[in-house]
Amino acid sequence: MKPRTLINHPPDTAPPEGNRAVIAPIYQTVKFEFDTVSRALEAFRGERPGYFYMRSSNPTTRQLELTLAQLQGRDDCLATASGVNAVAQTLLALTKQGDHVVFFIETYGPTRSIIRKLLARFGVTHTMLSIEDLDGLAQVLAAKPTRLVLFESPTNPMLKIADVERITSLAHQHGALAVMDNTFAGFHQHGEYAVDVFIHSLTKYASGAGDVMGVEPPSLART
């Protein structure tokens, strides 16, 4: 083989079966291969685990996702390119034309913009309340079928504290999902509450240095 071929296809030095690294390696490959076509097809159909392209999933990102899910007391997680991307993906995945969502005036500015501008383009209506107006929340939910209630605690940037238990309870009483942006709380054990979806921007308290981003929608991660 020519030198350029040898460089592009170096010898396989993966540890043998039963012998693995104590710390998971950082995978830098663009794509993954399978031993046989049948195994690739099984993975493609979801019949067995496997990875295809780095952009869709890879062992490094998957370890982060599962770690975040465990920290929040949930089954699964989906990492995205940024916190705002996580908010947008969550809302776009969980709503459709004709749906109604509730959020609060104290909510992070870009999140408000996504709901008021982006979702509105697709026929999703909204109601905006104060995070302290729980009586108003109860009235809105009783009067109008609602797909989800999105809230933060503490709020960004005014640091108002939401009544997580009451908000989630009201949402569920009226058949709505409770979606919580848990960014400013870091990994406070809000997982003990019946929140359906958690969102995190990992540049804040989760990282402490502003060098990581991610999201954690648990059981709804594959929506």
Image: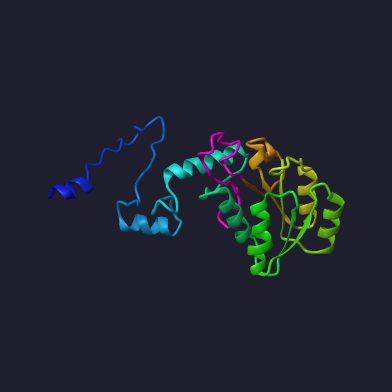
- The quadrant in which residue 204 appears is top right
Residue name at image x 46 percent, y 56 percent: 46
Residue name at image x 37 percent, y 32 percent: 21
Comparing 150 with 217, the one in front is 150
According to the image, what is the colour scheme of the structure?
rainbow
> In the rendered view, does 36 fall on the left or right side of 140?
left
What secondary structure is the magenta-colored segment mainly? Answer: loop
Q: Position of residue 41 (x, y in %)?
A: 38, 59
Looking at the rendered structure, the number of numbered marks drawn on it comes to 0
Q: Specify the quadrant that holds the C terminus.
A: bottom right
Q: Position of residue 181 (x, y in %)?
A: 66, 46
Task: Examine the structure image and report whether residue 112 is included in the region drawn in magenta.
Answer: no
Q: Position of residue 205 (x, y in %)?
A: 61, 36
> In the rendered view, does 176 fall on the left or right side of 207?
right
Task: Examine the structure image and report whether residue 214 is included in the region drawn in magenta.
Answer: yes
> In the rendered view, does 144 fall on the left or right side of 11?
right
Q: Position of residue 118 (x, y in %)?
A: 63, 63
Comparing 64 with 81, the one in front is 81
Magenta residue span: 200-223
> Residue at the left extreme?
1
Q: Is residue 215 above or below residue 117?
A: above
Q: Is residue 81 above or below residue 116?
A: above
